[in-house]
Amino acid sequence: MLLIIIITSFFDAGNNPETEIWKRSVTELSLAIGDSLMADFHVGAHTNSGGEIDTTRPGVMVECISTGLRSFEKRESLDSIRVKVTEVNCSGPESPILIYDSGNIFVEHDPQYPEHLSFEFLGIEMGPTGDESACYFIRESALGNTIGKCYKIEYWQKNECDSTYAFSYFQVDDQCPLITQSISVSDTVVCAGDCISFSTGSFWPISYAWSFPGATPDTSSEQNPQNICYPTPGLYPVTLIYENCFNRDTITKTDYIQVLPAPLPNGPAQNETVLILGDSAILEACATGDSYAWSPPTGLSCTDCPSPVASPAASTTYTLLVNADGPCTDTCTYSVLVGTPPIAGFSPAQSAICEDECVGFSFTGSGPVDSYSWHFPGGEPATSTGAAPQGICYPAAGSYPVLLVVQNAFGADSLLVENFVTVTPQVELTGEAVQPFSLAFGDTVQLTACATGGSYAWSPPDGLSCTDCPAPVLVATVSASYTLEVSNGGAVCAATCEYPVTVSFDERIYLPNAFSPNADGINDVFTAYGKHHRVESLQIFHRWGGMAYDGRGETAAWDGTSKGLPAQPGVYVYLLHYTDTRTGEMEMKSGEVVLVR
């Protein structure tokens, strides 16, 4: 479709130039719908034409023809504008038929953007505007049947000091010169399933219409279509229809793309097989072709067959190259992982605990482990996925099992141990944790357990009637701090109490101040009396300092004789050395005794 535009310029607000339209013609151009033309009016007017061609109805405008007028004056100085469109005779007196007349439209200035105008008219729209420019789009509905007709557009603008006028003519025809463009492709010979890209030059195009029979997708409107895929062998054409502002063309390449047969896919390109060491598996070819090549050969029953048996001793990645009848191939990979499953095993930090106590567990099995699944019936929390779960608490007494399931890529193993965790009741306190006593040497007292439990352990054992009973009798012989541990199960669930015992010591040794050795059986000898001493020596001296008696040992006692003869009555001095059997210390005592006859 051609747009023939005859442009005439005039600058005189007081004259009507319409009677001299053709005599004043200064430029004549043949343009297709969508062209852009710049002409020098007195006010700097220009025309644009643009739109889309309906390829099913060549030469018919389906959207619009546009013309634009641009003034060299600042928009902010405008007061009003007017647009008029008429259909005129293409070759003679005009006999104009009015299509549209906007009348004077007063300009409302935007204080922020004083040069920006935006109006919409019946059948005519003012399009994108900017600095010193404005476009008016004349719709097809306003022009009616445009082919072969001629039109005139007039434009007036006015401010308080001046006014300007511009006009132009255009005629619509259906002749379009050809485009001498070419297309190119990334590869004209491909394998079935491959994708290629197309490209072409650009000559101010309006649209591209590609056609790719046999491909996916089979059409495109992009200038350079990408990823056009051909799934089936054969020869295929490619067609491109250009449309730009000047003309249109159709380019067809017959038998342009050759698609060769490729191996027929029948499996994924990447495969993974897991084998326990010593096992084997069949590797199925990922495609069907004329020949097969496996590598490396290690652990394969064959290298040129479609389905070898694989039994590698270690993890191996195999590559398969499948070849069709020609240059087309397919490549696949097979990762064969070889290993052993793990073995479950575990141990607790302690297998016997008290109520409300917590315990941790650790994995003691073997082999690499990808996942752990612990189960603790009666415990809180009851499950865990950690390698070494900690803080598993048991609120109630009893015996509880533990289950562990371990897994890796090669298999799983489980271990269930019944009665693995023993939870013992807590010891119940019934008395004070510290019970002090103050006793005299030789006194006795019954100690009472501070708690009720399954077993009792007293220490030290000195002076106690028993060490594993709840209430032993203590004979006070030495100051000591006694400890009682009450337990409900070995060393766990125990309560400990303290019994500090302080023992005081009295003299409790007696020597008489007189005796009468007259064989009457009463007070016949002089010696030391008491329960907590052992006599080492007893010496008796008369008043002149001579020794009347020197006795040694526990049986030392003076019978009132001296050197085998009865001693004279009177006062004698004694010196006693003895050991305190309570403390083991040597003591000494002296005094006077009266011998009576």
Image (cartoon, rainbow, N blue to C red):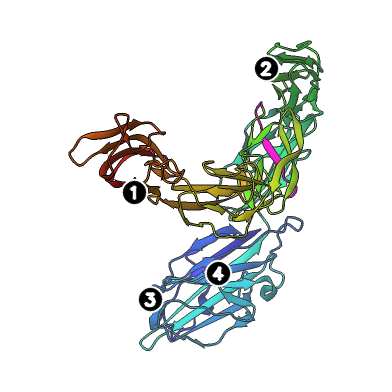
Residue 237 is covered by the magenta coloring: no
Range of residues picked out in magenta = 366-378
Residue 332 drawn above or below residue 4 = above
Secondary element under disc 2, as helix, strand or loop, is: loop
Question: Which label sits on residue 316?
Answer: none
The amino acid pointed to by label 2 is Ala
Label 4 is placed on what type of residue? Thr
Find numbered disc 1 in the image and state the secondary structure of the residue it sits on.
strand
Q: Quadrant of the N terminus?
A: bottom right
Q: CA distance from mark 1 to mark 4?
A: 159 Å
Disc 1 marks which residue? Answer: 514
Element on which disc 3 rests: loop
- Circles 1, 4 touching at the beta carbon (< 8 Å): no
Give the residue number, with chain letter if any, for mark 2.
314
Q: Which numbered tag is attached to residue 67?
A: 4
Disc 3 residue type (three-letter): Glu
Q: Are marks 2 and 3 in contact (CB under 8 Å)?
A: no
Q: Residues within 10 Å of mark 2 (few under 14, many from 20)?
A: some
- Residue 145 falls left or right of residue 103: right
Badge count = 4
